[in-house]
Amino acid sequence: FGELNDYHLFYHAGQNADRKSMWGKKLSGHEAVWEVFVRFCRGEITVLPWCDQGIALETTLISRQLVWINANGFLTINSQPAVNGARSTDRRVGWGGPGGYVYQKAYLEFFTPLAKLEQLIVALNKFPSM
């Protein structure tokens, strides 16, 4: 199966010195980690350990909201904006051949400390239709 250093994640984020300059030499707590995610959503950091590319062009449609979400301790690892009938040639959200249309639901994947999850559950219970 090959060597462990053949695994693709070993090469995602460049050299150790590069990572430290992007993410910080020492993360002092949860908020420091949150700030790394915020800076990625702003485009100030171009890679994360599991992502060797900057944010996707379609993410710029929701980057302001993602910054707020991450700054509040909900660390997003995957998301997409809602799209309702954009042309398949649209430079931000288009895909496929010309003449098509793109429809997609918004979604968000994140991880968060248990205390934040409990706060989210309380807030969501105020909206029974969710």
Image (cartoon, helix red, strand yellow):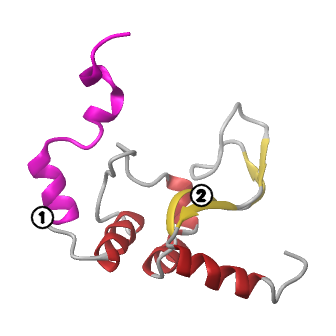
Q: Nearest to the eye among marks 1 and 2: give it.
A: 1
Q: Position of residue 61 (x, y in %)?
A: 57, 66
* Quadrant position of residue 10: top left
In the displayed structure image, the side of residue 105 where residue 93 appears, left or right: left
Residue in the image at 31% along x and 54% along y: 46
Name the magenta segment's main secondary structure.
helix
Quadrant containing the N terminus is top left
- At mark 2, the secondary structure is strand
In the displayed structure image, the side of residue 22 where residue 84 appears, left or right: right
Q: Is residue 21 magenta?
A: yes
Residue nearest the observer in this picture, 49 or 103: 49
Residue in the image at 21% along x and 76% along y: 28
Residue type, mark 1 in image: Lys
Instruction: Name the residue tied to disc 1.
Output: 25
Residue nearest the observer in this picture, 97 or 127: 127
Q: Residue furthest left?
A: 17
In the displayed structure image, the side of residue 111 where residue 125 appears, left or right: right
Q: Position of residue 69 (x, y in %)?
A: 52, 77
Q: Position of residue 43 (x, y in %)?
A: 35, 63
In the displayed structure image, the side of residue 127 where residue 109 appears, left or right: left
* Quadrant position of residue 3: top left
Residue type, mark 2 in image: Ser
44, above or below 52, in the image: below
Quadrant containing the C terminus is bottom right
Residue in the image at 89% along x and 82% along y: 128
Query: Which of disc 2 and disc 1 is earlier in sequence?
Result: 1
Q: Is residue 16 magenta?
A: yes
Residue in the image at 28% along x and 76% along y: 29
Residue nearest the observer in this picture, 77 or 95: 77
Instruction: Name the residue tied to disc 2.
Output: 79
* Quadrant position of residue 119: bottom right
Query: Which residues are drawn in magenta?
Result: 1-24
